Image (tube, coloured by chain):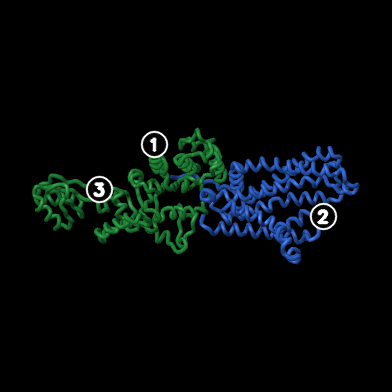
Chain colours: A blue, B green
Amino acid sequence: MSRAPAAPPGWTATVAGEWLKLRAMRGSLVIACLGPLLGTALCVLLAVAVGLESDGWSQQDRVEFDPLLFPLVSGLVSAVLLVVLGVRGGACEYRAGLVRLTLTVTPRRGRVLLAKIVVIAVASWVGFTVVTVLAALAAQPVFHAYGLPDVTNADLAAGREVRTLAADIGLAPVFPLIGLALAVLTRSAAGALTSVLALLFAPSIAGGLLPAWWAAHMLIYLPGPATDSLSLTGSDDVGLLSPGVAVPVVAAWLALFLGAAHRCLQRRDA
Amino acid sequence: MYGDTVAVDQLTFDVTPGVVTGFLGPNGSGKSTTLRLIVGLDRPSSGRATIGGRALRDLAAPIREVGVLLDARAAPAGLRARQHLAWLARAGGVPARRVDEVLAEVGLADLGGRRVGGFSLGMLQRLGIAAALLGDPAVLILDEPVNGLDLDGVRWVRGLLRRCAAEGRTVVVSSHLLSEMDQTADEVLVLGRGRLLAHGSVTEITRAGAGTHIRVASPRGPELAAALRAAGACVTPAPDADGVLLVTGLTAPAIGDLAAGRGLALHELTERRATLEDAFLELTGDTVEYQAVERRAVDWRAIGQQGAGRRGVRP
């Protein structure tokens, strides 16, 4: 049987295929619906709570209130849901042996992982931004009702708000990608999700139990505190890494997890 | 190798286009492992498997050159059938119109919008075959494609495989359903404990089986038996009829010529060929990895009686 040589599908075809696969999964649709809903609800709820307490605020408190950064509280919800998305992006391959089909269509395993990284990263950026914007829009009427300054009163001159927003959005894919890597390493959604959540919350729990030196010199280099150091840049919080240190630390953690996932995917039988 | 277990050992074979090649072997014989090695999912500790001279990962557009069905249940339950094929098509660089074409070809045209989780095993097999056909490949590798299919489905797969082979495609099918392979495969590879036990056409394999014999009846039976033994044949009396001989070691024409040369009349000269199942059991008898204890005892007795029987045909 003779035929014309087939044109090779490029890496963008692999990305498109991974996107179609992730988008079509029922869990992804649930996450896409729940994220904006819960993120907005949390933001509005906290805005009402702040509004109720604002009667007792001093003039200084009102000046310090930041209506532009307040909606970032919705990130608590979107961060967790995006981690779930990242974990699903990797673990879906192993639940029923889908990886065998994926790797016969795209035998270059590094390309498959790269495509997943691109899909999860872009979905994280878009998802985090959309939820934050929706939360900000929903919170403005609440601020207005309680006489709090709204987003039009935000002072952008110092650039602090813009930096923080950019850092938060820019860092949105970090933990979803770690979740993806752990899912490839463990081949289990439950194992990967537990590991990421432990990585997220263990430092703050352990910080209170360990000696101060450990918290200041060791735990701060874990992925959670390192990303906090970047997203909280400009705040007065002490005990954070400088951006010059935090950026390479976060990059190193990502490289470590994704590199291990790549090595595992390359060497292990599918 | 998996740990200390040798899954496939010294296995060398070529599969030719235009015929259906059946892959046979008992459980644990290395069939699926071999297929996985061919498509690059497992890595051999030594040796290589190539398709058209190249490893799968070196093919420009794998899905358009090799269609693979290894596990029908591998489709994500939450996806609709059309969505499942759509991502495969997109990742493989196959035009989107092929999705509906292959759905129609496997009889799932009306079920493209249904979630895969609600499919029966037979429907999953059809979907898996649709995925394998998506790129209109020159090579098809199907592991147990008729599992879970009803009679109509089995006949359809049989026709599909024959048609694909007739179109000049290379078709490799693994199955434990020997009767199915008997009807579908032109050539078979028999594996046992990861080694190649036999490779040849179904006719060659069954003819080589101990169950194949020539049934000969003559009014001068004892005289004929002596002549046949003198010619090197193995002759035993048939248990079901007096004066009838069962002959191995000579072909029917040779027996006929011998009888004619000695002026011996023949009342029956019939070749009774062993079935593929007979040949398979004979070939794999002592390589079966998993079997119930009682059955095992019986098999060992049987093997003891057979002695050092014929154990396969090497290509």
Q: Amino acid at mark 1?
A: Asp
How far apart are the alpha carbons under marks 3 and 1? 28 Å
Identify residue for label 2: A235
Q: Chain of mark 1?
A: B
Q: Amino acid at mark 3?
A: Arg
Identify residue for label 1: B152
**Chain-order first, disc 3 or disc 1:** 1
Q: Name the residue nearer the viewer: A153 or B99.
A: A153
**Which is more foreground, mark 3 or mark 1?**
1
Are discs 2 and 1 located on one and the same chain?
no
Q: Amino acid at mark 2?
A: Ser
How far apart are the alpha carbons under marks 2 and 1? 71 Å
Q: Name the residue nearer the viewer: B101 or A61.
A: A61
Identify residue for label 3: B273
Secondary element at tag 2: loop
**Residue B197 horizontal side relative to residue B84, left or right:** left
Q: Tell me, yes or no, if residue A80 can be seen here.
A: yes
The residue drawn where x is 62% and y is 59% is A259
